[in-house]
Image: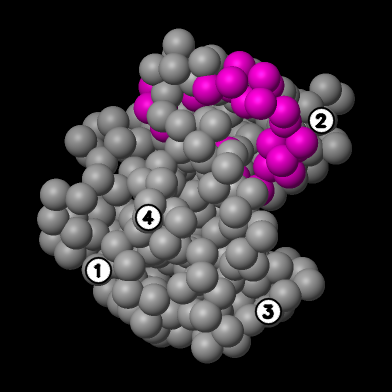
């Protein structure tokens, strides 16, 4: 398993709250300097506006830094996925992450199967795998069913068990169900903390190894289920905004990312 970093690990540093948001080139350079081997350009809308020359520059920068690129978007409409297949070809990407729902389209499992059967053959022909992420808007059993019914090795699951807790699905159950179809792993830890006055809980991210994620068990389950198939691990965070402001938040975001990469390196 190769390990890397997602744009989601730079969530605050590329947000409107940043005095000067990091550029894609800066994120690539930072990923390489931290020891990452993969960079997942995930839900990063500007990439859709890049022309061929700019995409070639991104691909060359990643190559020079020794990074493999992946892409991430949302939705299963054929036209949109065709756009990302084109982007994947220009960037040299072999994995695209997506999600079943978008703000304007929430397909039923039957509709999702029909749309993906229309789209996935083109991905397969291009040698690109499409991975659908586990998350709270879609039951994991439904997501697995969609992948099984499409029945193509170039369609699988991006496993992120923390997302599905909001659906009251246990992470261990999500891992068990999704592991046989997993093509990518999003690595982020998570924990519940009591609210002031003991009135409820906050569910948020925490440094890898300090929360509820059984990372070793997740990796073992995927390795057992997937055999020799290469499944990259991509670092993300759910880092809350810090009361001290942007500088403190950005500094902690960087520290969490470095900690996650170091943890993955030690686990190899």
Per the model, the C-alpha gap separating discs 1 and 3 is 25 Å
Residue 175: percent from left, percent from top: 32, 69
Residue tagged by mark 2? 18
> Which label number is shown at residue 124?
4
- The answer to if 225 sits in the magenta stretch is no
Q: Quadrant of residue 192?
A: bottom right
Disc nearer the start of the sequence (4/3): 3
Q: Which quadrant would the C terminus be assigned to in this image?
A: top left
Disc nearer the start of the sequence (1/2): 2
Residue tagged by mark 3? 106
The residues colored magenta run: 31-59
Per the model, the C-alpha gap separating discs 4 and 1 is 19 Å
Q: Residues within 10 Å of mark 2 (few under 14, many from 20)?
A: some
Residue tagged by mark 1? 180
Whether residue 31 is visible to the viewer of this picture, yes or no, is yes
Q: Quadrant of residue 18?
A: top right
Disc nearer the start of the sequence (3/2): 2
Q: Identify the residue at image location x=32%, y=74%.
A: 151
Q: Identify the residue at image location x=44%, y=54%.
A: 123
């Amino acid at each position: 398993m190769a390990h890397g970093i997602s744009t989601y690990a730079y969530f605050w540093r590329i947000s409107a709250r940043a005095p000067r948001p990091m550029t894609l080139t800066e994120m690539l350079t930072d990923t390489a300097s931290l020891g990452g081997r993969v960079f997942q350009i995930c839900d990063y809308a500007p990439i859709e506006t890049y022309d061929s020359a700019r995409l070639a520059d991104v691909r060359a920068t990643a190559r020079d830094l020794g990074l493999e690129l992946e892409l991430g978007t949302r939705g299963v409409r054929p036209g949109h996925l065709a756009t990302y297949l084109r982007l994947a070809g220009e960037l040299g990407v072999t994995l695209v992450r997506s999600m079943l729902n978008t703000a304007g389209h929430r397909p039923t499992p039957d509709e999702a199967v029909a749309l993906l059967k229309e789209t996935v053959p083109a991905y397969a022909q291009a040698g690109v795998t499409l991975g659908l992420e586990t998350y709270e808007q879609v039951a994991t059993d439904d997501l697995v069913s969609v992948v099984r019914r499409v029945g193509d090795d170039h369609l699988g699951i991006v496993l992120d068990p923390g997302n599905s807790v909001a659906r009251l699905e246990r992470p261990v159950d999500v891992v068990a169900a999704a592991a046989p179809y997993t093509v990518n792993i999003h690595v982020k830890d998570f924990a519940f903390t009591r609210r002031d006055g003991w009135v409820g809980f906050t569910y948020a991210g925490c440094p890898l190894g300090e929360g509820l994620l059984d990372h070793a068990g997740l990796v073992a389950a995927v390795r057992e289920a997937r055999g020799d198939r290469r499944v990259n691990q991509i670092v993300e965070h759910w880092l809350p905004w810090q009361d001290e402001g942007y500088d403190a938040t950005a500094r902690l975001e960087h520290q969490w990312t470095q900690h996650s990469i170091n943890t993955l390196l030690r686990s190899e």
